[in-house]
Every structure is written in C-alpha cells, then in structure tokens.
Image (cartoon, helix red, strand yellow):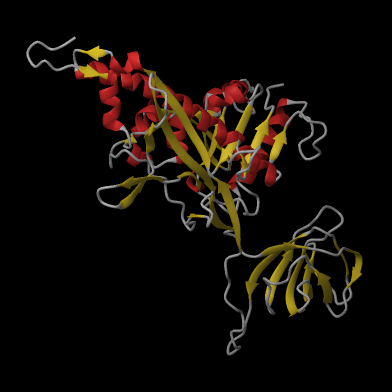
Amino acid sequence: MANLETWATYTLGGVLEEIVGKNLRIFPIMFKQFKHLAYCFFDIKQLSGENPGYTVAPKDIPGIEPSITVDGYSVKWLDYNTFDFTTTVKTAQASGTLSSNVATIVLKDNSGFAVNDTVYFKQYGTTGYDIDWTIQEVNADGETVKVYVHTINGAAATASASFKVAAGQEVVRGFWKRNDNDEISRPASVYSYKEYQSYIQHFSRRITFTKAELNKEYKYEGEAKNEATKRLNYNIWVMFQEINKALYKGKNIAPGVNDKMEMLWLEEICRQVSNIHDFESTANDAWAAATTEGMMMDYFYKVIEEAQQSGAIASNDTITLLVNDAFLTELGRFREGYGTGASLIRYDKVVDKLDMVLPTMATIYGDVELVRDPMLNVLYNYPVAFTLPKALVKLWTRENQEFNPKGWITRADQSIKFYDVITNLREQKSYDIEWECGMIAGGISAKQSPYHMIKNFKHK
C-alpha cells in the first residue's frame, strides 16, 4: 500500500538490508530476560547506559589479562594463587626422632623455600603432628629440606623428641628471619602462574524470509521495523538461552569433526578442582549423605567457609550463589536455630541499574548473595547452587571482523553481527546472526578454590 502523499512504501527486505553487516545491541534482550547474566558476567554500568554502545564490555579482572591463542580458537590467561608458597609432605615419617632438634623431611616441592624460613606443618589427624620448624638447608634435589624444630603439637621440642609426619600433610611457609647485620639472602618471591584456556563457543542462528515476506508492503516504516525486530529479538533471545546453558554445561572442547568448539564453564571447573558436593551421596566420603537438617546446614556452611577462605578472594568480598528455585525453597524451610526467614535471609539489596533484588544471607563468614537463575530449573531437577567469585569471572567475547572495501581496512567489534547469506535460492533470503565468547575464571588454582557445586540441598 502506498502513502498517497509521498508515494513511499516500506518493505521488510528494505529494512533488513539497512542493518546487514552492522552490529546489533545486545543489552535490551539481556536486560529483559537475563539480568543475572548481566549482573554476574558483564560490566553493568556499560550495559545500563552510562557508556551506551552496541557492543558489550567484559569487566576487568585484577591481575589477569587474557589473550587469544595463536591459532585463534581459544582464549588463555595466567592464573595465580594469591597466597604465598605452600606444598605438602611427600614421604611420611610415622615414628621420626629428632637429632639435636634437627630432622630431614621430603616434600613434594622445596623450590619456594630458603634458609631461615619459618615453616608450619598443619596437624593431619593422628598421623601428622602440628610442628613449627625453621629451614636450615634446601637440597638441590627439589624435594628435601633440613629443619630445626621449635615446637611439636604446641609444646617446646626437646633435642631428641619423637614426631610424626604424614604424606600429604600441608606445609605452610611463615616468614624469613635475620639478625642485625646479617646479609639479606632471601630471594624475591615470584608468582606461581598456571596457564588456563577456554575454547571459543559460537552462538549463532540463521533467519530465513520468503519472497512474500520480504516484499510485503507496509504503510509506515515503523511497521516494517517492528516486524523485523520481533523476528530478530526472538532468535537472539533463544541464542541467549543457549549461552545461559553453556555457562553451566560447557566442557572446554577443542574444534574437531565430531565435537565442535565448546567453552569451559562452572560444572567443569568444579569437577576439575574436586568441588562437586552431593549432600545425599553415600559414595562421597567427604560429603556423606546428610540425614539431619543440622548436618545439611553444617555441610552448607562448610562450602561457604571454604569459598570465603579461598586464596583468590579478599576477606571482605561477598560470595555469590547462583541458585535454582528448589534451592531457595529448601533454604526457606530450615527451622529456627539453623536459620529461617528473616534470621537467615535479608531481601534488602537492590542492583539499581538492573532493577534486580538480591536475597542476601548473613553468615558468620560474611554476606552471601543469592542470584536466582531460572535456567538452573531447566538443567537440574534437584536443589542446586554454584559458588561464584563474581569479581573473578567474565565472558570474553571474540571480535567479529568486517572488511570495509572502501577503506581497505578490517574493522572489529564485540557485538552480535547480522550477516547477509549468499545463496542460489531466488525465492527466499537468509541472514545469519552470530556472537562468540569464551570464559575467564580467575582463582581456579588458588588454595581452597572458590568454585563449588552443591547438589541435593534439602530440608530433612
């Protein structure tokens, strides 16, 4: 239908051609349906319009600078433990005896120690004593140290005292000692980096329009744009559902014929650091089946304590729990004494920019914010939660390239791209939407990793 005054008509095809090769703003869809993703993994201020744009800005993680790999298939980063050097005992001495307060101990690694370092062996049940030592000699074999013993289980050590050291017993370096006028021989400490990588995952869809749909005439340009917007928004919404699922189920798979590229994410991280806790599994010795509500809460607090004490998290950081509805329901059922209602959860924290209310649970280890993710209801049929150091995780977006024939340059940005598909089908027109990202998770290598998965948390 033509406009009688201007003789102008608008078609869907014409509107779509205007946005081919351009970026699509990612925030409106995320804001309406996926606020929890924006809050946990992106720069909220940038998304909310303080620095408006079409692309998304991943937040900065202190001390971690990601880079794309040489082959371009994955993103890598150097992660480090923010605690000082720690190691464990390699060879047990179940009935050792000191000689003039001196003993020789074999460790997994002695490279972090120097002469005159104080060292503490943390008690290991009944098979490893609580012992304070000073390093006298570091052997060149990379394992053996000679130590002078000061105390055993809190009592002053005699010259020929007996002691027990267990394989796997944790060894913690204290501080280096010197007297006035002693030469400073302690070498500088360096970060103990570990390299991690996450493969890039493609999130993309093809939208096809028939000739009839493309040629349908609209009286107003807004009508044509609304029709195009509905089709695009729906498919981008479906694409973000896939991103949301990948955040939990990504297995970090390299490109291949049968297995396509897949990024690393939470469940796989928890598996790698041995922090998947099934509270009803009798096969899991560390988290045996919890038969009472008191035991269930004790296990829950233990997880929070370990996450809060991680070497990757400052003591005043708030732990974030991504939870499903079943977890919230079970948490609300615990009786007074283990925390219910107002004694356990406060509903007073609001993320202003996203208009999102966060239940915040007060624990003796600090506040724990509960972020409800509806996708966890889809993926798991039991109460589940993931501990998340929000300041240390982000989605890293691979830049989409676009060649500009006029300027003979290649432009790149991190937006969702809308591409024209060239085919020989004359009766239809297809367009591709594409966005690619990987994951960066700091603190994986920290002592007591902050990443935990809690399964089957239930009121008894």
Q: Answer whether residue 157 is visible to the viewer in this image.
A: no
Left or right of 206, for residue 54: left
Residue occupying the far bottom of the picture: 181
Q: With respect to residue 62, does 16 lie above or below?
A: above
Quadrant containing the C terminus is top right
Q: Quadrant of residue 22?
A: top left
> At 62% across and 82% down in the image, what residue appears?
178
Q: Answer whether residue 428 is visible to the viewer in this image.
A: yes
Which one is nearer the viewer's eye here, 331 or 276? 276
Q: With respect to residue 430, does 58 lie above or below?
A: below
> At 29% across and 40% down in the image, what residue appears?
53
Residue 76 pos. (x, y %)? 54, 54
> At 38% across and 22% down in the image, what residue appears?
426
Left or right of 341, for residue 289: right
Q: With respect to residue 338, does 1 lie above or below?
A: above
Residue occupying the far right of the picture: 95
Which one is nearer the viewer's eye here, 84 or 43? 43
> At 78% across and 76% down in the image, what residue appears?
141
Residue 194 pos. (x, y %)? 61, 59
Q: How many marks?
A: 0
Q: With respect to residue 377, does 51 lie above or below?
A: below
Quadrant containing the N terminus is top left
Residue 26 pos. (x, y %)? 37, 33
Which one is nearer the viewer's eye here, 366 or 369? 369
